[in-house]
Image: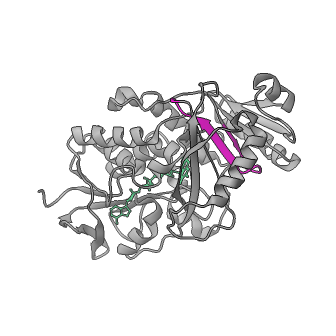
Amino acid sequence: MKESYRICIVGGGIIGTSVAFHLAKFGENRVAVFEKSYISSGATGRCGGGIRQQWSARMNVRLAMRSVKLFERFKEDTGMDIEYTQGGYLLMAYSEEEAEKFEKNVKMQREEGLDVEILTPEMVKERYPYINTDGLVLATFCQTDGHANPHLANLGYALAARKMGVDIYTHTKVEDIIVEGGKVMGVVTDKGTFRCEVVVNAAGGWSREVAKMAGLDFPTTSYRHQIFVTESLENFFPFMAISFDGNFYMRQTKHGQFIMGQGDPDEKPGINRNVTYRFEKEMAKKMTGIFPFLKNVRIIRHWAGCYNMSPDAQPIIGCSKQVDGFCYAVGFSGHGFMLAPAVGEALAELILYGKPRKVDISYLDIERFEKGISEMEKNVV
Ligand SMILES: Cc1cc2nc3c(=O)[nH]c(=O)nc-3n(C[C@H](O)[C@H](O)[C@H](O)COP(=O)(O)OP(=O)(O)OC[C@H]3O[C@@H](n4cnc5c(N)ncnc54)[C@H](O)[C@@H]3O)c2cc1C
Protein backbone atom coordinates (compact mmCIF):
# COMPACT_ATOMS: atom_id res chain seq x y z
CA MET A 1 0.00 0.00 0.00
CA LYS A 2 1.31 3.46 -0.90
CA GLU A 3 1.93 5.86 1.98
CA SER A 4 1.58 9.16 0.19
CA TYR A 5 -0.35 10.78 -2.64
CA ARG A 6 -0.45 14.29 -3.99
CA ILE A 7 -4.25 14.50 -3.66
CA CYS A 8 -6.58 12.59 -1.33
CA ILE A 9 -10.32 12.76 -2.06
CA VAL A 10 -12.83 12.09 0.70
CA GLY A 11 -15.97 10.52 -0.80
CA GLY A 12 -16.50 8.08 -3.66
CA GLY A 13 -19.77 9.55 -4.93
CA ILE A 14 -20.20 11.13 -8.36
CA ILE A 15 -18.36 14.30 -7.27
CA GLY A 16 -15.30 12.60 -5.74
CA THR A 17 -14.92 10.20 -8.65
CA SER A 18 -15.46 12.94 -11.24
CA VAL A 19 -12.70 15.02 -9.62
CA ALA A 20 -10.43 11.92 -9.58
CA PHE A 21 -11.24 11.11 -13.22
CA HIS A 22 -10.50 14.65 -14.39
CA LEU A 23 -7.26 14.92 -12.37
CA ALA A 24 -6.04 11.69 -13.97
CA LYS A 25 -7.24 12.77 -17.41
CA PHE A 26 -5.14 15.93 -17.05
CA GLY A 27 -2.11 13.77 -16.17
CA GLU A 28 -2.16 13.76 -12.35
CA ASN A 29 -2.68 10.23 -11.07
CA ARG A 30 -0.98 10.54 -7.68
CA VAL A 31 -4.53 10.52 -6.38
CA ALA A 32 -6.48 8.39 -3.88
CA VAL A 33 -10.25 8.28 -3.30
CA PHE A 34 -11.45 7.15 0.13
CA GLU A 35 -15.01 5.90 0.36
CA LYS A 36 -16.30 4.72 3.73
CA SER A 37 -18.82 2.40 2.08
CA TYR A 38 -19.15 1.29 -1.57
CA ILE A 39 -19.07 3.43 -4.74
CA SER A 40 -22.47 5.14 -5.19
CA SER A 41 -23.66 4.22 -1.68
CA GLY A 42 -24.37 7.90 -0.88
CA ALA A 43 -26.84 10.31 -2.47
CA THR A 44 -25.61 9.48 -5.97
CA GLY A 45 -26.90 5.91 -5.97
CA ARG A 46 -30.19 7.12 -4.48
CA CYS A 47 -30.91 10.00 -6.83
CA GLY A 48 -33.39 10.52 -9.65
CA GLY A 49 -30.74 10.81 -12.36
CA GLY A 50 -32.21 14.01 -13.83
CA ILE A 51 -29.93 16.22 -15.95
CA ARG A 52 -31.37 19.71 -16.40
CA GLN A 53 -29.99 23.03 -17.59
CA GLN A 54 -33.09 25.09 -16.75
CA TRP A 55 -32.09 26.86 -13.52
CA SER A 56 -32.86 30.21 -11.96
CA ALA A 57 -29.23 30.94 -10.96
CA ARG A 58 -26.86 31.72 -13.81
CA MET A 59 -23.94 29.71 -12.36
CA ASN A 60 -26.08 26.58 -12.27
CA VAL A 61 -27.07 27.11 -15.93
CA ARG A 62 -23.41 27.45 -16.90
CA LEU A 63 -22.28 24.37 -14.95
CA ALA A 64 -25.22 22.32 -16.22
CA MET A 65 -24.63 23.34 -19.86
CA ARG A 66 -20.97 22.36 -19.60
CA SER A 67 -21.97 19.09 -17.90
CA VAL A 68 -24.34 18.24 -20.75
CA LYS A 69 -21.45 18.62 -23.19
CA LEU A 70 -19.46 16.16 -21.03
CA PHE A 71 -22.40 13.76 -20.58
CA GLU A 72 -22.74 13.69 -24.37
CA ARG A 73 -19.26 12.18 -24.61
CA PHE A 74 -19.30 10.22 -21.35
CA LYS A 75 -19.15 6.84 -23.08
CA GLU A 76 -16.28 7.92 -25.28
CA ASP A 77 -14.38 9.37 -22.29
CA THR A 78 -14.94 6.56 -19.76
CA GLY A 79 -16.08 3.53 -21.77
CA MET A 80 -19.30 3.28 -19.73
CA ASP A 81 -22.82 3.37 -21.25
CA ILE A 82 -24.81 5.27 -18.62
CA GLU A 83 -28.24 5.04 -20.35
CA TYR A 84 -27.95 8.76 -21.12
CA THR A 85 -30.92 10.17 -22.97
CA GLN A 86 -31.68 13.72 -24.06
CA GLY A 87 -35.45 13.39 -24.01
CA GLY A 88 -35.91 16.85 -22.55
CA TYR A 89 -37.24 18.28 -19.29
CA LEU A 90 -40.72 19.73 -18.85
CA LEU A 91 -40.96 22.35 -16.07
CA MET A 92 -44.57 22.86 -14.97
CA ALA A 93 -45.83 26.04 -13.23
CA TYR A 94 -49.11 25.97 -11.30
CA SER A 95 -49.34 29.66 -10.27
CA GLU A 96 -49.08 33.03 -12.01
CA GLU A 97 -46.19 33.91 -9.72
CA GLU A 98 -44.22 30.78 -10.70
CA ALA A 99 -45.05 31.34 -14.39
CA GLU A 100 -43.61 34.86 -14.20
CA LYS A 101 -40.42 33.51 -12.63
CA PHE A 102 -40.16 30.89 -15.39
CA GLU A 103 -40.40 33.58 -18.08
CA LYS A 104 -37.65 35.58 -16.36
CA ASN A 105 -35.49 32.45 -16.06
CA VAL A 106 -35.96 31.59 -19.74
CA LYS A 107 -34.72 35.05 -20.70
CA MET A 108 -31.51 34.50 -18.70
CA GLN A 109 -31.14 30.89 -19.95
CA ARG A 110 -31.45 32.08 -23.57
CA GLU A 111 -28.79 34.74 -22.88
CA GLU A 112 -26.53 31.83 -21.87
CA GLY A 113 -27.26 30.15 -25.22
CA LEU A 114 -29.75 27.53 -24.03
CA ASP A 115 -32.57 26.57 -26.38
CA VAL A 116 -35.71 26.65 -24.19
CA GLU A 117 -39.37 26.73 -25.26
CA ILE A 118 -42.27 28.31 -23.41
CA LEU A 119 -45.46 26.22 -23.65
CA THR A 120 -49.07 27.09 -22.84
CA PRO A 121 -51.20 24.40 -21.12
CA GLU A 122 -52.91 23.83 -24.52
CA MET A 123 -49.54 23.15 -26.17
CA VAL A 124 -48.63 20.73 -23.37
CA LYS A 125 -51.98 18.93 -23.81
CA GLU A 126 -51.49 18.66 -27.55
CA ARG A 127 -47.94 17.29 -27.26
CA TYR A 128 -48.56 15.05 -24.27
CA PRO A 129 -52.26 14.06 -24.21
CA TYR A 130 -51.55 11.61 -21.39
CA ILE A 131 -50.85 14.48 -18.94
CA ASN A 132 -53.76 16.03 -17.02
CA THR A 133 -53.10 19.78 -17.42
CA ASP A 134 -55.78 20.97 -14.95
CA GLY A 135 -54.43 23.93 -12.99
CA LEU A 136 -51.30 24.24 -15.17
CA VAL A 137 -50.49 27.91 -15.93
CA LEU A 138 -47.35 27.57 -18.06
CA ALA A 139 -44.53 25.15 -18.86
CA THR A 140 -41.02 25.36 -20.26
CA PHE A 141 -39.18 22.65 -22.18
CA CYS A 142 -35.54 22.09 -23.11
CA GLN A 143 -34.86 19.19 -25.48
CA THR A 144 -31.17 18.79 -24.60
CA ASP A 145 -32.00 18.13 -20.93
CA GLY A 146 -32.48 14.48 -19.99
CA HIS A 147 -31.46 11.78 -17.57
CA ALA A 148 -29.01 8.93 -16.99
CA ASN A 149 -28.38 6.02 -14.65
CA PRO A 150 -26.47 7.48 -11.66
CA HIS A 151 -24.95 4.14 -10.50
CA LEU A 152 -23.40 3.59 -13.93
CA ALA A 153 -22.13 7.17 -14.12
CA ASN A 154 -20.51 6.93 -10.67
CA LEU A 155 -18.94 3.58 -11.55
CA GLY A 156 -17.92 4.86 -14.98
CA TYR A 157 -15.86 7.65 -13.44
CA ALA A 158 -14.41 5.38 -10.72
CA LEU A 159 -13.34 2.61 -13.09
CA ALA A 160 -11.91 5.01 -15.67
CA ALA A 161 -9.97 6.86 -12.95
CA ARG A 162 -8.62 3.56 -11.61
CA LYS A 163 -7.54 2.55 -15.11
CA MET A 164 -5.51 5.76 -15.30
CA GLY A 165 -3.72 4.94 -12.02
CA VAL A 166 -5.94 6.46 -9.29
CA ASP A 167 -6.20 4.29 -6.14
CA ILE A 168 -9.74 3.82 -4.87
CA TYR A 169 -10.11 2.62 -1.29
CA THR A 170 -13.67 1.48 -0.60
CA HIS A 171 -14.86 0.64 2.94
CA THR A 172 -12.20 3.06 4.18
CA LYS A 173 -13.30 5.93 6.38
CA VAL A 174 -11.38 9.19 6.68
CA GLU A 175 -11.33 9.92 10.42
CA ASP A 176 -9.13 12.99 10.54
CA ILE A 177 -7.23 15.47 8.39
CA ILE A 178 -3.71 16.42 9.44
CA VAL A 179 -3.16 20.18 9.26
CA GLU A 180 0.16 21.70 10.34
CA GLY A 181 1.04 25.38 10.18
CA GLY A 182 -2.20 26.10 8.29
CA LYS A 183 -1.39 23.50 5.62
CA VAL A 184 -2.86 20.09 4.78
CA MET A 185 -0.31 17.32 5.45
CA GLY A 186 -2.35 14.12 5.20
CA VAL A 187 -5.41 12.07 6.11
CA VAL A 188 -5.96 9.55 8.88
CA THR A 189 -8.18 6.64 7.86
CA ASP A 190 -9.33 3.47 9.61
CA LYS A 191 -6.85 1.62 7.35
CA GLY A 192 -3.84 3.85 8.04
CA THR A 193 -2.41 7.35 7.54
CA PHE A 194 -1.57 8.81 4.12
CA ARG A 195 0.51 11.93 3.54
CA CYS A 196 -0.73 14.36 0.88
CA GLU A 197 -0.60 18.01 -0.21
CA VAL A 198 -4.27 18.43 -1.08
CA VAL A 199 -7.48 17.04 0.43
CA VAL A 200 -10.77 17.31 -1.47
CA ASN A 201 -13.95 17.31 0.59
CA ALA A 202 -16.44 15.46 -1.64
CA ALA A 203 -18.28 13.90 1.27
CA GLY A 204 -21.83 14.86 0.22
CA GLY A 205 -24.18 14.62 3.22
CA TRP A 206 -21.16 14.42 5.54
CA SER A 207 -19.41 17.53 4.16
CA ARG A 208 -19.74 19.50 7.40
CA GLU A 209 -18.08 16.72 9.47
CA VAL A 210 -15.21 16.41 7.01
CA ALA A 211 -14.65 20.21 6.97
CA LYS A 212 -14.56 20.11 10.78
CA MET A 213 -11.66 17.64 10.58
CA ALA A 214 -9.63 20.48 9.02
CA GLY A 215 -10.89 22.96 11.62
CA LEU A 216 -13.36 24.62 9.23
CA ASP A 217 -17.04 25.39 9.74
CA PHE A 218 -19.09 24.74 6.59
CA PRO A 219 -22.68 26.04 6.34
CA THR A 220 -24.07 22.81 4.88
CA THR A 221 -27.01 20.83 6.26
CA SER A 222 -28.35 17.45 5.17
CA TYR A 223 -32.02 16.58 4.76
CA ARG A 224 -33.67 13.29 3.85
CA HIS A 225 -35.39 13.01 0.45
CA GLN A 226 -37.54 10.00 -0.41
CA ILE A 227 -38.09 8.53 -3.84
CA PHE A 228 -39.76 5.43 -5.29
CA VAL A 229 -39.89 3.40 -8.47
CA THR A 230 -42.83 1.58 -10.08
CA GLU A 231 -43.09 -1.58 -12.10
CA SER A 232 -42.37 -1.21 -15.84
CA LEU A 233 -44.70 0.11 -18.52
CA GLU A 234 -44.02 0.30 -22.23
CA ASN A 235 -41.58 3.18 -22.92
CA PHE A 236 -43.49 6.29 -24.03
CA PHE A 237 -42.31 9.06 -21.66
CA PRO A 238 -38.87 10.23 -22.86
CA PHE A 239 -38.63 13.48 -20.88
CA MET A 240 -38.43 14.32 -17.19
CA ALA A 241 -41.34 16.27 -15.68
CA ILE A 242 -40.84 18.56 -12.69
CA SER A 243 -42.74 21.20 -10.78
CA PHE A 244 -41.40 23.37 -7.96
CA ASP A 245 -44.72 24.77 -6.75
CA GLY A 246 -46.33 21.38 -7.48
CA ASN A 247 -43.45 19.72 -5.57
CA PHE A 248 -42.68 16.66 -7.73
CA TYR A 249 -40.38 15.20 -10.36
CA MET A 250 -40.75 12.06 -12.46
CA ARG A 251 -39.05 10.19 -15.27
CA GLN A 252 -39.26 6.80 -17.00
CA THR A 253 -36.13 4.63 -16.97
CA LYS A 254 -34.71 2.79 -19.95
CA HIS A 255 -36.39 -0.35 -18.58
CA GLY A 256 -39.82 1.29 -18.38
CA GLN A 257 -40.10 1.97 -14.65
CA PHE A 258 -41.26 5.37 -13.38
CA ILE A 259 -39.04 7.02 -10.74
CA MET A 260 -40.54 9.91 -8.78
CA GLY A 261 -40.05 12.03 -5.69
CA GLN A 262 -41.07 15.17 -3.80
CA GLY A 263 -39.61 17.30 -1.02
CA ASP A 264 -40.99 17.44 2.53
CA PRO A 265 -40.99 20.95 4.07
CA ASP A 266 -41.31 19.37 7.55
CA GLU A 267 -38.17 17.24 7.20
CA LYS A 268 -35.72 17.64 10.12
CA PRO A 269 -32.00 18.13 9.41
CA GLY A 270 -29.72 15.09 9.76
CA ILE A 271 -28.86 11.83 8.02
CA ASN A 272 -32.01 9.72 7.94
CA ARG A 273 -32.49 7.10 5.23
CA ASN A 274 -35.68 5.47 6.53
CA VAL A 275 -38.84 5.64 4.42
CA THR A 276 -42.42 6.51 5.39
CA TYR A 277 -45.84 5.28 4.28
CA ARG A 278 -47.03 8.92 4.30
CA PHE A 279 -44.65 9.68 1.42
CA GLU A 280 -46.04 6.81 -0.69
CA LYS A 281 -49.62 7.85 -0.01
CA GLU A 282 -49.05 11.56 -0.80
CA MET A 283 -46.98 10.89 -3.90
CA ALA A 284 -49.34 8.27 -5.30
CA LYS A 285 -52.36 10.56 -4.85
CA LYS A 286 -50.70 13.58 -6.45
CA MET A 287 -49.01 11.75 -9.31
CA THR A 288 -52.01 9.67 -10.39
CA GLY A 289 -53.96 12.98 -10.58
CA ILE A 290 -51.46 14.61 -12.95
CA PHE A 291 -50.40 11.41 -14.75
CA PRO A 292 -53.57 9.27 -14.77
CA PHE A 293 -51.81 6.42 -16.62
CA LEU A 294 -50.06 5.64 -13.31
CA LYS A 295 -53.31 4.47 -11.69
CA ASN A 296 -52.99 0.82 -10.56
CA VAL A 297 -49.27 0.71 -11.43
CA ARG A 298 -47.49 -0.86 -8.46
CA ILE A 299 -44.63 0.67 -6.48
CA ILE A 300 -41.80 -1.84 -6.39
CA ARG A 301 -39.11 -0.08 -4.34
CA HIS A 302 -38.92 2.97 -2.13
CA TRP A 303 -35.75 4.43 -0.61
CA ALA A 304 -34.26 7.65 0.76
CA GLY A 305 -31.05 9.65 0.47
CA CYS A 306 -29.77 13.05 1.54
CA TYR A 307 -29.70 16.46 -0.07
CA ASN A 308 -26.67 18.37 1.22
CA MET A 309 -28.12 21.90 1.29
CA SER A 310 -26.15 25.14 1.12
CA PRO A 311 -27.63 28.46 2.34
CA ASP A 312 -28.43 29.66 -1.23
CA ALA A 313 -29.11 26.19 -2.74
CA GLN A 314 -26.08 26.61 -5.02
CA PRO A 315 -23.00 24.40 -4.67
CA ILE A 316 -19.94 25.44 -2.67
CA ILE A 317 -16.79 24.78 -4.71
CA GLY A 318 -13.23 26.00 -4.33
CA CYS A 319 -10.06 25.80 -2.24
CA SER A 320 -9.84 27.22 1.27
CA LYS A 321 -8.07 30.50 1.95
CA GLN A 322 -7.72 29.49 5.61
CA VAL A 323 -6.26 25.99 5.25
CA ASP A 324 -3.81 25.65 2.40
CA GLY A 325 -4.54 22.50 0.37
CA PHE A 326 -8.13 22.01 1.55
CA CYS A 327 -10.47 21.99 -1.45
CA TYR A 328 -14.18 21.25 -1.54
CA ALA A 329 -17.18 20.55 -3.77
CA VAL A 330 -20.19 20.25 -1.48
CA GLY A 331 -23.69 21.64 -0.76
CA PHE A 332 -25.18 20.48 -4.05
CA SER A 333 -28.72 21.02 -2.74
CA GLY A 334 -30.31 18.22 -4.75
CA HIS A 335 -28.56 18.71 -8.08
CA GLY A 336 -25.04 17.35 -7.74
CA PHE A 337 -25.47 14.42 -10.09
CA MET A 338 -26.15 16.58 -13.13
CA LEU A 339 -23.42 19.10 -12.31
CA ALA A 340 -20.73 16.51 -11.52
CA PRO A 341 -18.93 16.39 -14.89
CA ALA A 342 -18.35 20.17 -15.05
CA VAL A 343 -17.60 20.41 -11.33
CA GLY A 344 -15.02 17.60 -11.47
CA GLU A 345 -13.38 19.22 -14.47
CA ALA A 346 -13.34 22.72 -12.95
CA LEU A 347 -12.04 21.63 -9.53
CA ALA A 348 -9.34 19.44 -11.09
CA GLU A 349 -8.24 22.45 -13.19
CA LEU A 350 -8.32 24.76 -10.16
CA ILE A 351 -6.09 22.34 -8.21
CA LEU A 352 -3.65 21.68 -11.06
CA TYR A 353 -3.51 25.04 -12.86
CA GLY A 354 -4.82 27.51 -10.24
CA LYS A 355 -7.76 28.40 -12.49
CA PRO A 356 -10.57 26.52 -14.29
CA ARG A 357 -10.35 26.69 -18.08
CA LYS A 358 -13.97 26.12 -19.12
CA VAL A 359 -16.29 27.49 -16.41
CA ASP A 360 -15.29 30.26 -14.01
CA ILE A 361 -16.42 28.93 -10.60
CA SER A 362 -14.89 31.68 -8.44
CA TYR A 363 -18.37 32.92 -7.45
CA LEU A 364 -19.08 29.55 -5.82
CA ASP A 365 -16.33 29.54 -3.20
CA ILE A 366 -17.24 29.59 0.47
CA GLU A 367 -16.29 33.26 0.92
CA ARG A 368 -19.49 34.32 -0.87
CA PHE A 369 -21.49 33.77 2.35
CA GLU A 370 -19.46 36.43 4.18
CA LYS A 371 -21.42 39.01 2.17
CA GLY A 372 -24.77 37.32 2.90
CA ILE A 373 -26.92 35.58 0.31
CA SER A 374 -27.10 37.44 -2.99
CA GLU A 375 -28.99 34.95 -5.16
CA MET A 376 -31.11 31.95 -4.11
CA GLU A 377 -31.53 29.06 -6.54
CA LYS A 378 -35.30 28.62 -6.70
CA ASN A 379 -35.66 25.69 -9.12
CA VAL A 380 -35.26 22.96 -6.51
CA VAL A 381 -37.76 20.27 -5.44
C1 LIG B 1 -33.89 11.28 -3.58
C2 LIG B 1 -32.86 12.11 -4.30
C3 LIG B 1 -33.08 12.49 -5.63
C4 LIG B 1 -32.12 13.25 -6.31
N1 LIG B 1 -32.31 13.54 -7.62
C5 LIG B 1 -31.34 14.18 -8.31
C6 LIG B 1 -31.47 14.37 -9.71
O1 LIG B 1 -32.45 13.96 -10.35
N2 LIG B 1 -30.45 15.01 -10.37
C7 LIG B 1 -29.34 15.47 -9.70
O2 LIG B 1 -28.46 16.08 -10.31
N3 LIG B 1 -29.20 15.29 -8.37
C8 LIG B 1 -30.16 14.65 -7.66
N4 LIG B 1 -30.00 14.43 -6.33
C9 LIG B 1 -28.82 14.99 -5.66
C10 LIG B 1 -27.60 14.15 -5.95
O3 LIG B 1 -27.85 12.81 -5.60
C11 LIG B 1 -26.41 14.66 -5.13
O4 LIG B 1 -26.30 16.06 -5.23
C12 LIG B 1 -25.11 14.04 -5.64
O5 LIG B 1 -25.25 12.65 -5.73
C13 LIG B 1 -23.99 14.42 -4.70
O6 LIG B 1 -22.86 13.64 -5.01
P1 LIG B 1 -21.69 13.56 -3.97
O7 LIG B 1 -20.62 12.76 -4.58
O8 LIG B 1 -21.39 14.94 -3.47
O9 LIG B 1 -22.33 12.83 -2.69
P2 LIG B 1 -22.52 11.29 -2.39
O10 LIG B 1 -22.99 10.53 -3.55
O11 LIG B 1 -23.36 11.22 -1.15
O12 LIG B 1 -21.07 10.81 -2.07
C14 LIG B 1 -20.39 11.20 -0.89
C15 LIG B 1 -19.67 9.99 -0.39
O13 LIG B 1 -18.79 10.35 0.67
C16 LIG B 1 -18.68 9.25 1.52
N5 LIG B 1 -18.11 9.73 2.78
C17 LIG B 1 -18.66 10.63 3.64
N6 LIG B 1 -17.85 10.82 4.69
C18 LIG B 1 -16.76 10.06 4.48
C19 LIG B 1 -15.57 9.82 5.23
N7 LIG B 1 -15.35 10.44 6.38
N8 LIG B 1 -14.66 8.97 4.73
C20 LIG B 1 -14.87 8.32 3.55
N9 LIG B 1 -15.99 8.49 2.82
C21 LIG B 1 -16.91 9.35 3.28
C22 LIG B 1 -20.09 8.73 1.62
O14 LIG B 1 -20.15 7.39 2.03
C23 LIG B 1 -20.61 8.94 0.20
O15 LIG B 1 -20.55 7.76 -0.58
C24 LIG B 1 -30.94 13.68 -5.62
C25 LIG B 1 -30.71 13.28 -4.30
C26 LIG B 1 -31.65 12.49 -3.65
C27 LIG B 1 -31.38 12.07 -2.24
In depth, the one of 280 and 319 nearer the eye is 280
Q: Residue at x 35, y 47 (%)?
A: 17
Q: Is residue 351 left or right of residue 255?
A: left
In this view, the residue in front, 242 or 366, is: 242
Q: Nearer the viewer, residue 143 or 268?
A: 268
Residue toward you, 240 or 257: 257
Q: Position of residue 35 (x, y in %)?
A: 31, 57
- Residue 355 makes an appearance in the image: no
Q: Residue at x 77, y 40 (%)?
A: 290
Residue 149 as seen in the image, left or right of residue 6: right
Left or right: 17 in relation to 267: left
Q: Residue furthest left?
A: 1
Answer with the quarter of the image where residue 54 lies. Answer: top right
The segment highlighted magenta reads 241-255
Judge whether residue 249 is colored magenta.
Answer: yes
In this figure, what is the number of numbered marks? 0
> Is the residue 376 above or below the residue 25 in the image?
below
Quarter of the picture holding the N terminus: bottom left
- Residue 32 appears in the figure: yes
x, y percentage for residue 94? 83, 45
Q: Is residue 225 magenta?
A: no
Q: Residue at x 20, y 43 (%)?
A: 165
Q: Looking at the picture, how far across and down is residue 270, in whole percent?
A: 53, 70
Is residue 206 left or right of 233 when viewed as pictured? left
Q: Residue at x 64, y 68 (%)?
A: 372
Q: How is the image coloured?
A: one colour
